[in-house]
Amino acid sequence: MVRLQSPNARELAARELRASGAGELRTAILDNPAFENIWKSAPKAEDARRLAWLIFEGIDRSPEEIADEYQGWREWIDKTLPDKRFGTRALMWAAAFCDGGQRRSVLRMSEDLRRRLREDRGPAAILSDTPSSKRLTDAEIERDGDTVRLSPARHGLAEALRAYLWDEFEDPELRDIFTDWLVVQLGELPFDDAERVARSVLDIVIRFRDDALLRALRDRLTGDKRPIAVRTLSQAALDPRFGAHVRASLYAWARTSRSQADLVAEVCGGAFGDQQPEMALVRLGWAAQNSLPDSPALASALASLAARHPEAVLRSIAKWFDDDDRLTVGVNAFLALASTSAGAALLCGRADPASGQPGFRDVLIGYFQRSLSEPSSYEAAISVLKAWEKFSADGTISSRTATSVLGRALEPALGKNPMSQLHPGFPDMDSFWGQAFEVAIRGKDADQVTHAPGDPLMVPEAPARQDTDSDAFAYAPATPSLPTDAGTDASAQAS
């Protein structure tokens, strides 16, 4: 039997430093007595690498400071906090969640926490309190103009104080107070400071697997602060420590809650989709199932992904169209992509005979025909056709290719009289719709664009993980039960 053990932490740290180009002189710091207890504790490989990184970037910090930061400043906090008045502690915790933020924001957060913890903060108590400048100094918070920051001499102190607050005070009532306190700040602070608090909240979510905080982050950041939630969740989905859990949450939200489908789509169109397009498309598929065909969020996400990963997006749409159980997904995703100028340019460009993708034209016609044949998507499809007329007029797409494709697409739908919506009255035969309806009425005889069946691009060589994504299996059952935050509409339950 071969026993596999973690590598020697000191040797691993030394190798990491050398690989990073630190040199032997910097690597020699590992022999400093400040790290002796760390080596004796036999840290995991991940922790040894973290220590190596702290050493590498901390050229202006002493071995003792680096060791303290690695251990979360725990000894310093244990010795310092007992001497601090509650008001000073509240200031330190406020600054820990809004480090580098406006002085006014940190003071406001501190006052709000003190009131929530039922301290008397009436007018007389506030007027008789120590001046804020003295309280900031006592809390080891430095002021720089209108902003404040915890002592820069203690690198990583803000992160350590956040972890201490959540780890030390586990009483459910206190946790609820802390959660409500932070959630309110997300909604009330100025944009930049709200984003600082959101990143700090995410740090707690990652460290303590706190799903209640994750949902609070999702639900509170709405309106003009929605971009904060999108950026924060998109980055969290890529986190090596917690990303799998965030991705599983996105999967569950998209699959079971129509109210969250647009948020999931926006997240998938960000950094997450850029770096992990296949995983993002799995979740976009469920978002498309629970979204309306004309969802702006879905359209924007698919257009963003298609600009960077066109093959992955087209393969996914083809797979959804080929699966009778996912046809709604295919139709919604296709119409969302086609409704954008970037999506129209991609689709129409590939339908051009000069594109080198001759079979794609027939595939595209089939997508439009199917979208027009479904009662649930007919109006959305008509809207996309109108958009293509505009894209043709401004030169975004080729008018000749568009009229040929749309004419063939309209042929089976002539019984529904789409002309009444697209062009009331009889259009000039030289106009966009005049040419399109001539193709529709006369069929292939009026269609001068050559084409050939069978597009190899649209048949995936190796199917993406789509609906068997390993993250989803790891955290979500095959037939998920509705989470407490899920919607209860019929379409969500049916999915």
Image (spheres, rainbow, N blue to C red):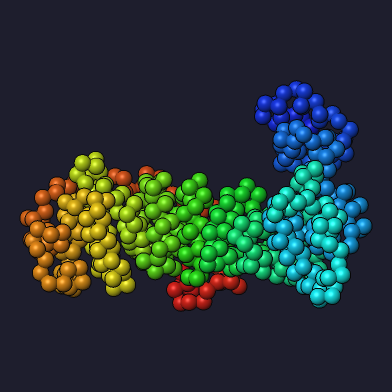
Q: Quadrant of residue 134?
A: bottom right
Residue sitting nearer the eye, 33 or 474: 33
Q: Quadrant of the N terminus?
A: top right
Is residue 262 at least partly visible in the picture?
A: yes
Q: Is 241 situated above or below 112?
A: above
Q: How many numbered discs, if any?
A: 0
Q: Quadrant of residue 435?
A: bottom left
Residue sitting nearer the eye, 140 or 467: 140
Along the horizontal axis of the image, is 193 left or right of 429? right
Q: Is 494 situated above or below 78?
A: below
Look at 91% across and 52% down and name the residue there. 79
Look at 52% across and 74% down and name the residue there. 487
Look at 65% across and 49% down and name the residue there. 241
Look at 70% across and 54% down and name the residue there. 146
Is residue 454 at least partly visible in the picture?
A: no
Along the horizontal axis of the image, is 11 left or right of 393? right
How far across and how far down the image is residue 384, in percent?
A: 28, 63
Residue sitting nearer the eye, 327 or 99: 99
Residue sitting nearer the eye, 272 or 147: 147
Q: Quadrant of residue 477?
A: bottom right
Along the horizontal axis of the image, is 437 left or right of 370? left
Q: Is 1 situated above or below 140?
A: above
